[in-house]
Each structure stands twice: as structure tokens, then as C-alpha cells.
Image (cartoon, rainbow, N blue to C red):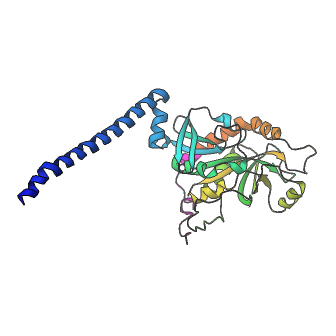
């Protein structure tokens, strides 16, 4: 017994003490490394972007009354510095426009790039970022008209959609089966506020069905004749965005700008210049609509739409 005590005193306790010191040294070294790295990043990039990169979405988005997701022609509406939201589907740059009593968050589908093909947009990351902001979402979509009465420059508020895409990831639930209800895909509350606002401003608009195609090519005349039998406008970015928003429990609606007649409904060949020109001509009006909608949603923030409960009782 005495021998064991001597062995413990001579060998075990000193070894334990040495290993403890070594562990503390390693812990101190890592802490010092991260602290120095944090300070260097602040010196190079400033406090705000580093803070958001490390800690994610904090209180900066508390004042956001509306999140806007835009595509072609809407990128230059972002006048503020970008903040980065980290999601497990990728990072997303968000521009926050500050106003007197609220903010509006702008997310570009193309994320600072000149253009991303519609079938390559990271829709999961965009919606995951919008979910972190925790504000109602309005998507801006450019569409082609399949009805003679819907001319270029006309606004369109979809109340339903048809999915003709092929290769896109359309769900957050790849490891379990969740049958989310899509009988009312766009938020009733946002649609009601938006259409009331457009009517009050005497801005002509229509409602109806949006069909989403895979792209990036434009549709053929035969495809348009088929789609026109059961829908009103055609675009390439509305799906799976609307589906993912529903799965995320977001209040989500869309404001479409008709930029051109669809294939076979005009004499000229369709070009991207037509789309960009139509958006540029109505951009100031669109911006005014966004601000008015954000104010109206902030005032009417209490509502009983089903969006937040969309995945309840949907899992098998």
C-alpha cells in the first residue's frame, strides 16, 4: 500500500499535472489564435461584416418589414452594403434599405453575379436566408404574357402556379416525407394587401395562374399554345421558390411584371433586351409599390393566414 502511494506521488500525479498544463496551453493557444484572427478580420473588413459572418443573423433584421427577392433588372435597386447570411445551403448576400420606421431587405437571385441561369439559382439558400430574416416575402418575377389582354408593362399577381420544371431541387425534406399543402400557394394576406394597394394607386393589374418552365431557353410556339389553355403568364424563376417558401412557413407572394408577349404572340423574335427594358421603365413605380407594401404589412402585421402552419400534420 505504501509502495502504491509512493508510485502515485512520484509518477501519476506529476504526469496528470503535466498533461493538465499541456491541455490548458493548447486551449489558450486556440483561444489566442481565434481572438487574434477576429481582431485582424475586423481591421481588414470592419466590425459589422465580421460580426455577421461569425454570429449569423442578429438584431439588424428586427426592423425588416418586407423581404424582396428579385432577378433580372432588379439588382441595381440594392443601394446599401451587403450583409451575409450563412445557411446550410450556402451563403446569401442581403442588402437592407433603411427608412424612418422600418427596413426592407433585398435579396438578388443572382447574388452579385452578372447572371445565374434560372435552373441553377440556389433557391434553397435564398429561402433559408429569408426564413432567418423572419419577415413577409415578396418575389419579383419577369414574365411573358399568353393572353392578348395582358400587354407588356402590365402587373400580374399570381394566385396559383403550374410547375413545368425538370431538374430543380424542390424540397427541404429529402430525408423524410412531408406532403405540404399547396392548395393556396401564395399568402392570402400579402396578396390581399398588395392588390388593395395596387387598386388604390390605380395601377392596372390582373390575377391568375403562373406557369414555370425550366429554361434557360424561351418556350416554343407549340408549348405556349398548350400552356395558354390552363395559365396566363409564363416565367422561369417562380418555382421552386414558392414551394420552398411554403415548406419554410413563410408568408410569400409574387408581383410579376409582364415584359413581353410569349412566343407566337408577337411578330418579333424574343430577346433579353425586351425584358430588361420593361423592368427599367417601371423600376421607380415598382420601388414605390415595395415601400407602400412594406408600410401596409407593418401596420397589418396581425393576420390569420395558414402560411406559418403549412407543414403541420404533413409528415408521414
Chain part drawn in magenta? 296-316
Which residue is at a point 53% across and 70% down the rendered structure image?
313
Q: Position of residue 36 (x, y in %)?
A: 38, 32
In the displayed structure image, the side of residue 143 where residue 80 appears, left or right? left
Q: Position of residue 293 (x, y in %)?
A: 62, 44
Quadrant for the N terminus, please: bottom left
Viewer can see residue 315:
yes
Question: Magenta includes 302?
Answer: yes
In the displayed structure image, the side of residue 271 where residue 254 appears, left or right? left
Question: Residue 27, relative to residue 264: is it above or below?
Answer: above
Residue sitting farthest toward the left = 2
Residue sitting farthest toward the right = 267
Q: Position of residue 258 (x, y in %)?
A: 79, 46
Q: Nearer the viewer, residue 279 or 49?
A: 49
Q: Nearer the viewer, residue 52 or 58?
A: 52
Viewer can see residue 295:
no
Q: Position of residue 99 (x, y in %)?
A: 55, 35
Which residue is at a point 46% across and 31% down the rendered structure image?
41
Which residue is at a point 79% across and 53% down the rendered structure image?
233
Amino acid at each position: 500500500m505504501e509502495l502504491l502511494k509512493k508510485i502515485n506521488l512520484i509518477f501519476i500525479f506529476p504526469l496528470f499535472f503535466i498533461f493538465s498544463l499541456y491541455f490548458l496551453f493548447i486551449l489558450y493557444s486556440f483561444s489566442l489564435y481565434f481572438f487574434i484572427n477576429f481582431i485582424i478580420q475586423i481591421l481588414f473588413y470592419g466590425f459589422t461584416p465580421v460580426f455577421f459572418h461569425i454570429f449569423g443573423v442578429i438584431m439588424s433584421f428586427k426592423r425588416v418589414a418586407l423581404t424582396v427577392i428579385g432577378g433580372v433588372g432588379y439588382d441595381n435597386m440594392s443601394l446599401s452594403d451587403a450583409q451575409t447570411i450563412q445557411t446550410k445551403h450556402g451563403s446569401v448576400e442581403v442588402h437592407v434599405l433603411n427608412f424612418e420606421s422600418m427596413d426592407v431587405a433585398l435579396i438578388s437571385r443572382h447574388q452579385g453575379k452578372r447572371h445565374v441561369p434560372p435552373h441553377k439559382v440556389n433557391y434553397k439558400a435564398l429561402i433559408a436566408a429569408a426564413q432567418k430574416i423572419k419577415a413577409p416575402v415578396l418575389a419579383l418575377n419577369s414574365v411573358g404574357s399568353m393572353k392578348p389582354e395582358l400587354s407588356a408593362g402590365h402587373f400580374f399577381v399570381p394566385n396559383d402556379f403550374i410547375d413545368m420544371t425538370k431538374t430543380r431541387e424542390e424540397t427541404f425534406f429529402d430525408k423524410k416525407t412531408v406532403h405540404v399543402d399547396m392548395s393556396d400557394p401564395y399568402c392570402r394576406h400579402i396578396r390581399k394587401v398588395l392588390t388593395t394597394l395596387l387598386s388604390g394607386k390605380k395601377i392596372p393589374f390582373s390575377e391568375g395562374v403562373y406557369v414555370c418552365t425550366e429554361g434557360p431557353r424561351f418556350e416554343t410556339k407549340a408549348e405556349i399554345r398548350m400552356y395558354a389553355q390552363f395559365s396566363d403568364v409564363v416565367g422561369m424563376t417562380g418555382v421552386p421558390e414558392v414551394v420552398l417558401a411554403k415548406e419554410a412557413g413563410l408568408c410569400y407572394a409574387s408581383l410579376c411584371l409582364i415584359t413581353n408577349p410569349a412566343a407566337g404572340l408577337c411578330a418579333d423574335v424574343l430577346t433579353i433586351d425586351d425584358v430588361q427594358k420593361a423592368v427599367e421603365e417601371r423600376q421607380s413605380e415598382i420601388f414605390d409599390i415595395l415601400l407602400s407594401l412594406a408600410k401596409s404589412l407593418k401596420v397589418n402585421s396581425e393576420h390569420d393566414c395558414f402560411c406559418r402552419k403549412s407543414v403541420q400534420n404533413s409528415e408521414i
